[in-house]
Image (tube, helix red, strand yellow):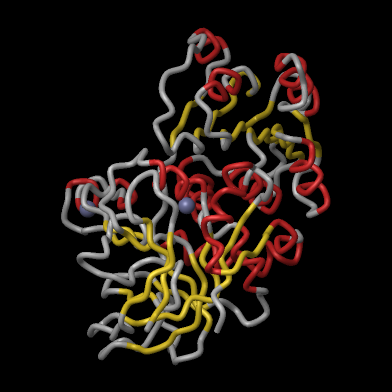
């Protein structure tokens, strides 16, 4: 039998259950996950903040070994031959290819009928469709990419979901230009992925505005960000915001990337770009409600305000391509805390409490 971590219903603890081993469908494959990542979205799923079907095997990010290829499956997304035992990552979502977003607007992240492993493939339809399991069965259309041999799998997991999210935001929505100053709001995995990619893209200075202090110390030790401002530990947020603007050159940053998630961060963030700068909002993936903003900031600063939603398979392939360069420059593995698969509930509580930066479930071979 195959063990998997199931969310039985909203608000309940996750539990390990067993299912018959899956068989690969033609054009698909079965993967044996080595690691399944835990992301903030998983907490929202558990709490019922998103309308998903239950019971469901969770895990929309993972890295594993090809276990069995389905009939007709021979290569990864780059056309590289695939064989059992190859380390791979895969994209959680498959866009439909036919809705207006896919076909007319060329925006597959906005697909109206996206099917996502670990999010909307319930046990009733497909038991083993999440990465928090000994096996996951992928269907035709899933984007699978080989992970280069020299990349430490733990390092690859540091930004498993955040990395492709920021590749989409920074490749397509608002690229970082060489020599720009950048302020990143938020020091969780999304914020640190933004800061690391901004540096790699040639930013002259990257200021990480976040907290608590322990998280910023972890970022510093990993080599991520040129300057760090603790907003959480500062009694008056205005002091921290002014300090971030100063560190970005006084008048504010050329580009500010919101990766904090709390709605109030957007009200604060609109005051951080220089006049004529850009504000890229990435962190508000879950609807956290309203916040009071001063729209004058947008006009007086003449801001470009840009949103970026999720990612596609292409962004996962691009993230994996960047991994050797990212891992050479930053100590990504130091950001990750591994928990055994059976301790998934404990790991979720650690993520909720903020005691770990990036939690992954380790699936014993
Ligand atoms: Zn995620
Ligand atoms: Zn679609």
Res 177 visible: no
Q: Quadrant of the C terminus?
A: bottom right
Decide which of 318, 288 is in the foreground and name it.
Answer: 288
Q: Position of residue 243 (x, y in %)?
A: 79, 22
Residue drawn at point x = 44 percent, y = 40 percent: 308
Residue 219 against residue 86 in the figure, above or below: above
Residue 70: image location, x then y, percent? 29, 87
Side (left or right) of 313 relative to 341: left
Q: Nearer the viewer, residue 277 or 96?
A: 96
Whether residue 129 sits left or right of residue 361 in the image: it is left
Q: In the image, residue 176 lies at what x, y percent?
A: 60, 43
Which residue: 54% across, 52% down? Answer: 348
| Residue 3 appears in the rendering | yes
Q: Is residue 104 above or below residue 257?
A: below
**In this rendering, would 116 be left or right of 4?**
left
How many marks do you count on the picture? 0
Question: How far from the left and from the top, in percent, is residue 40?
Answer: 51, 46
246 vs 270, left or right, is right
Q: Choose between 322 and 135: the one closer to the eye.
A: 135
Q: Residue at x 58, y 34 (%)?
A: 260
Q: Quadrant of the N terminus?
A: bottom left
Between 13 and 219, the one lying in front of the other is 13
Q: Quadrant of residue 114?
A: bottom left
């Amino acid at each position: 039998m195959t063990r998997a971590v199931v969310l039985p219903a909203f608000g309940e603890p996750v539990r390990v259950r067993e299912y018959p081993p899956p068989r690969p469908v033609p054009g698909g494959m079965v993967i044996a996950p080595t690691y399944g990542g835990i992301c903030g979205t998983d907490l929202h799923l558990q709490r019922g903040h998103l309308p998903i079907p239950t019971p469901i095997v969770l895990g929309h990010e993972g890295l594993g070994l090809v276990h069995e290829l389905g009939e007709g499956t021979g290569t990864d997304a780059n056309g590289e031959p695939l064989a059992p035992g190859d380390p791979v990552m895969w994209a959680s979502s498959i866009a439909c290819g036919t809705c207006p977003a896919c076909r007319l607007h060329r925006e597959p992240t906005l697909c109206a009928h996206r099917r996502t492993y670990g999010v909307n493939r319930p046990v009733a339809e497909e038991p083993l469709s999440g990465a928090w399991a000994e096996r996951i069965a992928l269907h035709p259309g899933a984007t699978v990419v080989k992970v280069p041999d020299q990349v430490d799998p733990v390092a690859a997991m540091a930004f498993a979901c955040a990395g492709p999210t920021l590749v989409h935001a920074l490749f397509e929505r608002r690229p970082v230009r060489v020599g720009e100053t950048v302020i990143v709001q938020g020091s969780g995995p999304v914020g640190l992925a933004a800061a690391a990619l901004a540096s790699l893209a040639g930013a002259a200075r990257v200021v990480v505005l976040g907290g608590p202090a322990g998280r910023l110390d972890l970022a510093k030790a990993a080599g991520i960000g040129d300057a760090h401002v603790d907003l959480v530990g500062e009694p008056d947020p205005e002091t921290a915001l002014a300090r971030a603007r100063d560190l970005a050159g006084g008048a504010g940053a050329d580009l500010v990337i919101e990766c904090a998630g709390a709605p109030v961060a957007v009200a604060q963030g609109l005051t951080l770009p220089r006049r004529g700068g850009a504000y890229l909002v990435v962190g508000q993936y879950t609807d956290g409600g309203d916040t009071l903003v001063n729209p004058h900031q947008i006009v007086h600063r003449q801001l470009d305000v840009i949103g970026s939603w999720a990612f596609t398979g292409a962004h996962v392939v691009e993230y994996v391509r960047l991994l050797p360069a990212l891992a050479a420059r930053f100590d990504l593995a130091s950001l990750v805390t591994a928990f055994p698969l059976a301790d998934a509930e404990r790991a979720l509580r650690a993520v909720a409490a903020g005691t770990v930066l990036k939690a992954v479930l380790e699936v014993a071979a």
